[in-house]
Amino acid sequence: MNAKKEAAPLPEDLHVFLTVIRKAGFAAAADELGLSPAYVSKRIQILETTLATRLLHRTSRRVALTEDGERVQRWAVRILEDFQLLHDELSDAHSAPRGRLHLCSTFGFGRIHVAPAVSLLAELYPDLEIRLDLFDRVVDIVNEGFDLEIRVGDDIPGQHIGRRLVTNRRMLCAAPEYLQRRGTPQLLGDLENHDCLVIKERDNAFGIWHLERDGVHDSVRVSGPLSSNSGEIALQWALDGRGILLRSAWDVRPLLEQGRLVQVLHDYTQSANVWAVYPTRLANSGKLRVCVEFLQQHFQQLSL
């Protein structure tokens, strides 16, 4: 007589389960995982059968955890983290990082600078499976399932680890035709009487520029007829002579050299350092260390 063996939940099913919870639905989870909603539903059913309990309350609009589902969620996070640490340790032993790496960054910097760097990283380490998502909002890297965020600015959450990849600053500039038409500001307060191209990014205060001169911080309220949540659009408006722009050196340095933009109020700048931010639980991750060290070397070579 053959004894029936108790099946153990598969890591794949635990990963699907956590994604369904995070995305609050089967369709959204399927979209993120690159799977069909039917397959995601099937994996959840298999997990529930394996554990002999219902994990989710399903309605037409959303899913919610049952009491057992909350217990499984806590264990699933721990189990998958242990799997990941084992994977990283083995990768270290073979000096060849492998496995999944989920990155995020902002739209502008991510598209222009992070994406090409990730392409080179993938070429160097073909066993890595890298996903890069871009946002114009604040990202909770732990609850949203990210391993690493490439962030511009020094506001690093205290519960995470931040490693500076490259030093950079933002500067004030405008097109020559705008300055000929409206004059060149001589004092910081003069900006209040100019058309300024205001960018609303992430959680930055809208319409207030925080600047620094000789180690002293100052602020000025700015406004203008044009504003956007895209730095690339604001940069194009500046080139069209529509106003004064506060933008990172990596964007405007070539344009300054070409004379298409002119720096104003040279003494005032704003910190725009680039950081790698990751959860403390990944402090000893081998593949993450390799990725961060590569990005640091890559960006410093570019002299952003």
Image (cartoon, helix red, strand yellow):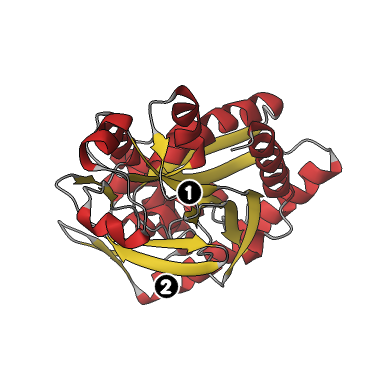
Q: Position of residue 131 (x, y in %)?
A: 50, 38
Q: Which mark is residue 266?
A: 1
Q: Position of residue 103 (x, y in %)?
A: 52, 45
The answer to whether any part of residue 142 appears in the image is: no
The crowding category of the residue bearing disc 2, from other C-alpha atoms within 10 Å (few below 14, some 14 to 19, many at least 20), is some
Dot 2 amino acid type: Glu
Q: Is residue 245 above or below residue 45?
A: above
2 and 1 marks in contact (CB < 8 Å): no
Q: Which mark is residue 70?
A: 2
Nearest to N terminus: mark 2 or mark 1: 2
Dot 1 amino acid type: His
Residue for point 50% across, 54% down: 267
Q: Position of residue 256 (x, y in %)?
A: 46, 31
Q: Is residue 182 above or below residue 68?
A: above
Left or right of 54, for residue 96: right
State the separation of the CA atoms marked 2 and 1: 55 Å
Left or right of 88, for residue 25: left
Q: Nearer the viewer, residue 285 or 28?
A: 285
